[in-house]
Amino acid sequence: MKNQIKTPQSNKPFIYFILSTLFLFTIASCSSDDDTTEPPVNNDNIINISQFQTDAQGWRITGDAQGGYVEASYSPDGGVNDGYIYADDDVAGGVWYFTAPDLYHGNKSVYYNATLSFSLFQTSAMDNQFENADIIFRNGSDQITYVHALTDYPTSEWTDYSLKISTESGWLKGDFDSGTPATEAEIKAILSNVTEFSIRGEFQSGPDTGGMDNIKISLE
């Protein structure tokens, strides 16, 4: 009987395993740390959403708070959806806003007739509230503005707001104190190339802290 010569087993499966593991590890290591997006939401009607469940999602503070154009402060607890952003007023003059990241910029024609909703709170003396532009969409130097779109000023509890991005809601073309009622064509022209989207965080003349959560633009 002939001696059987054992042929070594092929090590290809092991090599493929090693290469696959290294490939997946490389992809995971090189993936961009994009803090401007949220986990997927199972709702086809939602165009953009920021719920701050992990961080500030690229939202910034502009104006008279925390030194100017800086990333919003973030709290992982106490928001509408387990996390929110906030800012403390510098009380140096001017008005401060929560300003959206690139996720909300560019051609946003789909925003027309969509619903914008969000939640705010403020901690202040609540004794000297003032009117100003509550919401701003800007296309370069042109803008549409919502002037005290909010039926009530935010309280120390989360206060919910919702409005249409259309002529039926009373947007102005221009600034809050000199704008004229925006036409459908003017609103759509701004939305065709959004360079800024901001929501007011300050409503009190004097020291204040303001928070925001659950920003959503949807077709609902």
Image (cartoon, grey):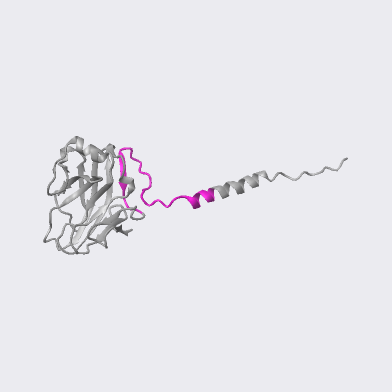
Q: Quadrant of residue 144?
A: top left
Q: Is residue 18 left or right of residue 181?
A: right
The kind of secondary structure the magenta stretch mainly shows is: loop
Position of 11 relative to 61 (above/below): above
Q: Could you say where residue 125 lies in the image, as x and y percent from the top left?
A: 15, 63
Position of 90 relative to 109 (above/below): below
Q: Is residue 24 left or right of residue 180?
A: right
Which residue sits at x=11%, y=60%? Answer: 128
| Residue 117 appearing in the image | yes
Q: Could you say where residue 124 lies in the image, as x and y percent from the top left?
A: 17, 62
In this view of the protein, which residue sits in the foreground, 106 or 169? 106
Q: Total label count?
A: 0
| Residue 157 appearing in the image | no
Q: What's drawn in magenta, residue-wise?
A: 24-53
Which residue sits at x=26%, y=45%? Answer: 140
User: Within the magenta stretch, is there residue 30?
Assistant: yes
Q: Quadrant of residue 75?
A: bottom left
Q: Could you say where residue 203 lies in the image, as x and y percent from the top left?
A: 16, 57
Q: Is residue 87 left or right of residue 2?
A: left
User: Within the magenta stretch, is there residue 10?
Assistant: no
Q: Residue furthest right?
A: 1
Which residue sits at x=23%, y=37%? Answer: 188
Q: Residue furthest front?
A: 141
Q: Could you say where residue 173 lies in the image, as x and y percent from the top left?
A: 17, 42
Which image quadrant: the C terminus? top left
Which residue sits at x=58%, y=46%? Answer: 20
